Each structure stands twice: as C-alpha cells, then as structure tokens.
Image: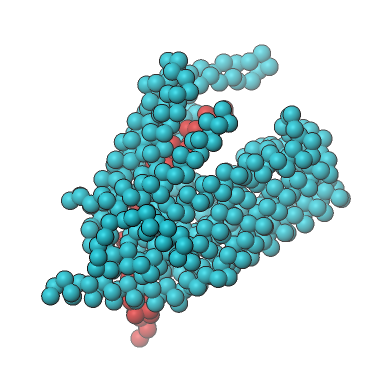
Amino acid sequence: MAKEKLTQSEIDGVQYRRAKLWQIILVACNALNGMAIYSPASASASPP
Amino acid sequence: MGGLLTFTRIFDAITDPLLAFLYDRVNTRWGKIRPLMLLGWAIQSLGIMAMFSWAASKGFGIPMFLITYMIYVIGYTIVNMTAQTLPALLTNDPKQRPTVGVWQTVFNYLVPMAFTIILNTVLLPKYGQITVTEAGGYAVNYSQAYLTAAAAFTVIVSLVGVILVCIGISAYDKPENFEGTNKSGERLKWKDMWAVLSKNKPLQAYIIAASSDKIAQQAGSAAIVGTMLSGILIGNMTIATYLSVGGMLPSIIFAIIGARYCGKHGNKESIVNWAKYCIYANLAIIAFFTVTWYTVGTHTIANLGLTMVLYILLTLICNGFMMAGTTANTAFMADIIDYELDRSGKYIPAVVSGTYSLVDKIVSSFSALIATGCVALIGYTNTMPQPGDTPTGAIFWVTMFLRYGLAILGWLCTLWAMRTCNLGKAEMVEVQKRIADKKAEAKAEMAE
C-alpha cells in the first residue's frame, strides 16, 4: 500500500491556513491594476 | 523641474507609512481589504483621468500637474499598500506562500505585453496620428484624443483587476484575520511604527538587503546603461528587445523553481543562496565580456555566433537567478509580518510593508544619480552616450560596473545583512506555533 504523503501541517505540527489556487490567481490579478497604469506610460515613451 | 521631481519622490515615499494608519482604522462590515482597494482605485482613477484628460491640454501648467499627480499617488499607494498585505493574509503555509509570488510574476509579464499590443495596434491607429516621414519611417503624435482613450481604457482594466482581487480575497477579508494576539486592542500609534523599525531585526535585515539590491538593479537598468551596453559595446539595440521578450518564459520558469526552493529550504535561506548564485552568474558574465573585449571584440555579439549564444545564455541565467531571489523576497515579507505579530502581538502588515517602502524609495532614488555620475566621470557631462559611439575602455568598464558590478555589491550587502537574521525555516515554524497558541488562548479568554 502506498504511503500517504504528509501535509506540511502534519510535518510541522501547525494548522496552516491554505488558499485555493483560484483565490491566489484572482489576487494576482492586481497586476491588471499596477501594470495597466505602468504600461501606457512606458508604451508612450517608446513609439512602435 | 528637478525640485518638482524631488518633491514628488518625497511625497511618494512618505505616503506609504502615513496611509498605514488608514489601513489600521478601516474596518467595515464588508471587511478591510475590499473597501480599501476600491477606495484606492477610485482616487487613483480620478488622478489619472484628470492628468491625461480632464485637466490636460488646457494650459493649467505645473500646479495642476502637481495636484493631479499627488491625487494619483495617494490612490495608487492605498491600492499598492493593501495589495502588499495580501500574500500574508492568503496563506501561512511555508510551501504555498512562495507560489503567490509566482502568479504575480506571470501576470506582471503578460499584462504589459497585452497592454502594449492593444495600445499600439488598436488605440493608437484609431486616436493617435501616425505620419510617414521623408526618410520612409513613421512619426507618432500621441494626441489628446489618444491620451484620453488610453487613460479611460487603463481605468476600466484596472477596475476589472481590483474587482477580481476583491473576489479572490473575500473569504479572508474578515475582522478575526486582522486581530492581534495581545489583549489591549489599541489603535496604531507612531511609536508602533518606530518600534517596528527599531526592534524587528528581520525587517532591518530585509530593508538593507532589498534596498541595496534595488538601488543596484535600478542603476544597472537605467536607459544610458542599456545604450552603452547594447548600442555602443554590442552595436545592436534590438538585441535587448529580443532578450526582453524571449526572456519572459525562462524568468517564469525560474520563478517556479525559486518557489519550490523556498518551500524546501525556507525563504530566508533562499534569499541568501540565490544572492550567492547571482554573484557567481554576474562574475561569469563580466569574465565573458572581458575575454570577448580583449579578443574578438564585443561587437561580435551582434552577429549570430558563439559570443551571441553565450551572451544570451548568461543573461537568461543572471535574470533567472534574480527572479528566483525576488520570489523569495516576496514570501519573506509575509514572514516578517507574521514575525511582528508574534513579537509585538499586533497585526500591522501595512506598517511593516510601509516602513520598508519608505526606506526603499528614499534609498533607490539615488540610483539615477549613481548612473549619471559614473557616466559623467568618463566625459559625458554635457551629452549622453548615443548608439554608435566609438566603444572605449572607459565605456566598457563603466558599463560592466553599472550593469553587473553594482548588482554584485548589492548582493554582498544582502549576504552581510542576512547573516544576523534568525528568521529561517525552523524559526518560522516556531513563530506560527506561538501565534496559533496565543490566538487560541485569547479566544478561550473571550469565551469565558
């Protein structure tokens, strides 16, 4: 029988708080805010 | 103009710690993060639309620019400061924490690429003025109509981004996640900010490490350094563009490798080890350039051959190692926030990130001075280096110093600063245990 892989919580003895993947991806969408403002400034500075 | 720019830099630096007080005081029935993100977006959008459209091309001059820029900085700071507290809020699992930075890296590459394409292929032909020059090239006039359209498009896309963040964080945007472990529940005071700076040793180490890296990397990536490297020594400016585009995927791969390395070894250990690897990689590229300069000439890098292949390979390795280090830095900031909760009993993520940001912005504002100062030392006092200038020994060594040598000094500062930092993998496990115990104790006392 295959040995079950221990979670990090079980290894460290701490109940960690874990996010779901979709939550991490949505939070990373803050780049749409920061990079959206940065991009036009840099695009305008260097014509095509 | 110099005084104006200096004022805007100082204003940008001091808003971070000041708005940390706003972060501490906002607690609504919709949470803390979501109202702050939306408020920050609204203020920043007001600044952008005023700067590029409503108050633009009307002859209001510098005072209006200053006012609209300050409005933009306040809004942008609220959003950015709040966003920097999210990785710590999402997860405290040491294996998962670094992966937050990986996804941020992916979007930080994809969004500017998509934006540049849309702006240049959709908005510019429609609203800008493109004319054909006598030489057969193109001249672009970024008309007011184009700036208005670009500003409106930016505001709409940034709103979409902020809404998506609010959806993603909604499960964690609850008052109990912002409570400290001490019982006083006092409001944030200025002395708390001073206590963070003076007593949080990992934060002190991180400030020295990250600021020295940033000042070096900003000086090294200054436009004049790029001109000297690609335009003069190599003799081909487009190679930098190809490297920038082609280097995206390897950088993302290294971010993933960096996240896995952090999960296995700890964030602090990762920062130290990747700093060492970065030093070795940069020494290797300096050695490559030196041998090439004294043998076949650096202009051979512009032509398809061994020197071009080696240059591309070494650059991708250098950039990749830096990206792995950046992933560790992002996760380590979240560790510092939790360390402060354990140390002082106060959950003050905006104070921690705002204190770092203040020092970082002040220090890195000297990067332009370093670059222009070094270039002035080799004779460029009234003019700037131009592509096609004759490559000289002075230009070669100043370029090597600014592009690669200064970064090595930054990483040496990192190694020196981190040697006194005890917040390694094992200690972080103990920090999380203590926080969990203190929170359980506080909950039990409240229940009584």
Query: In the picture, which chain is cyan?
Result: B
Is residue B100 at least partly visible in the picture? no
Q: Quadrant of the N terminus of chain B?
A: top right
Q: Residue A36 at x, y = what percent? A: 43, 38
Q: Quadrant of the C terminus of chain B?
A: bottom left
Q: Residue B160 at x, y = what percent? A: 32, 40
> Outermost residue toward the bottom?
A1
Does residue B146 lie above or below B220 as drawn?
Answer: above
Does residue A40 lie above or below B298 as drawn?
Answer: above
Q: Residue B69 at x, y = what percent? A: 43, 31
Residue B262 left/right relative to B322: left
Residue at image location 68% in from the left, 48% down from the top: B403
- Colour convention: by chain
**Count the marks: how many?**
0
Of B257 and B447, nearer the camera is B447
Residue at image location 67% in from the left, 42% down from the top: B371
> Outermost residue toward the front?
B191
| Corner quadrant of residue B55 | top left
Q: Residue B49 at x, y = what percent? A: 37, 27
Query: In the picture, which chain is red?
Result: A
